[in-house]
Amino acid sequence: MSLVVTGATGHLGHLVVEHLLARGTDPASIVATGRRTEALADLAAQGVRTAKVDFADPATLDAALEAGDTVLLVSSSEVGQRVAQHANVIDAAKRAGVARIVYTSASKADTSPLILAPEHKATEELIRASGVPFTILRNGWYTENYGQSVEQAKATGSFVGSVGDGRVSSASRTDYAEAAAVVLTTDGHEGAVYELSGDVAWTQPELAQAISELIGREVTYQDFSPEDHSKALLAAGLDEGTVGFVVALDGNTRDGLLGDTSGDLSRLIGRPTTPLVEGLRPLVG
């Protein structure tokens, strides 16, 4: 029986494997999977088994999964294709007779109007309908998502958005990865749904202050109306689809959809979540 980590070539999946190893998990019991197995060479060098898996190719899934495995389904990065890809993983898991699926979902996916929620809600429904035991990790926002804001601040001394007074309870990606490793290696999580987020919900001016501290110069946040934000992004060369997505996401933030602080994440990892400044530090360079 193995711990199968999908998407291990991505940032989150790779960190999950690193945390599994740090927790003393036998490398030979871990199967790190992804479409580019060459990106898993550092893990293979530590004794982790690797396998090529493509969510769009069920044959690769069938080859990677065995009865009794616990599978971490790291959600696909291909927005718009996630449900079909995730369905392939869930179907393969059911065929193989895996012991449990652990899925990285989104905050309050079953009820939230968050623009990213529908595909996660559909995936959760597929997992429940499969009959395979499960744990749902509803990951909140990653501090690393603000890399572009950091770059803008370094270049111009400011960054822009249309989030108003909306708060964000972000945590570092490694925090979420550690929580996944805990759930994969400890008992008592079957059927659980965890709402994961950082311990502190902060505003954009507080983000500006944190960036200021790190780069050693004053940084300001400019809050635009959604209409003016759209115009600015279009003028910067973004396509209309991307602009619509960014402005809608800022609207979700403005509406408070990213600001909950349930405490589930810090309870799972047994420590406070990474403070904003420390989470941003690797982005400053």
Image (spheres, rainbow, N blue to C red):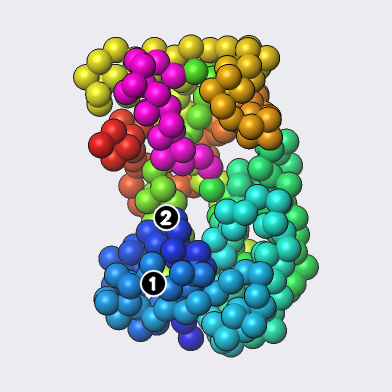
Left or right, 196 with respect to 151, comes to right
Q: Residue at x 37, y 59 (%)?
A: 15
Percent across and percent down for residue 88 are: 69, 71
Category of crowding for the residue at label 2, using alpha-carbon neighbours closer than 10 angstroms: few (below 14), some (14–19), many (at least 20): few
The tag on residue 11 is: 2
Percent across and percent down for residue 77 are: 57, 53
Q: Residue at x 71, y 51 (%)?
A: 80
Residue 112 in sight here: yes
The span picked out in magenta is 140-159
Percent across and percent down for residue 60 are: 59, 80
Q: Earlier in the sequence, mark 2 or mark 1?
A: 2
Q: Amino acid at mark 2?
A: His
The mark total stands at: 2
Gap between marks 2 and 1, in whole Å?
A: 15 Å
Give the residue at mark 1.
38
Examine the image and state in which quarter residue 23 appears.
bottom left
Most common SS among magenta residues: helix
Q: Decide which of 106, 159 is in the foreground and name it.
A: 159
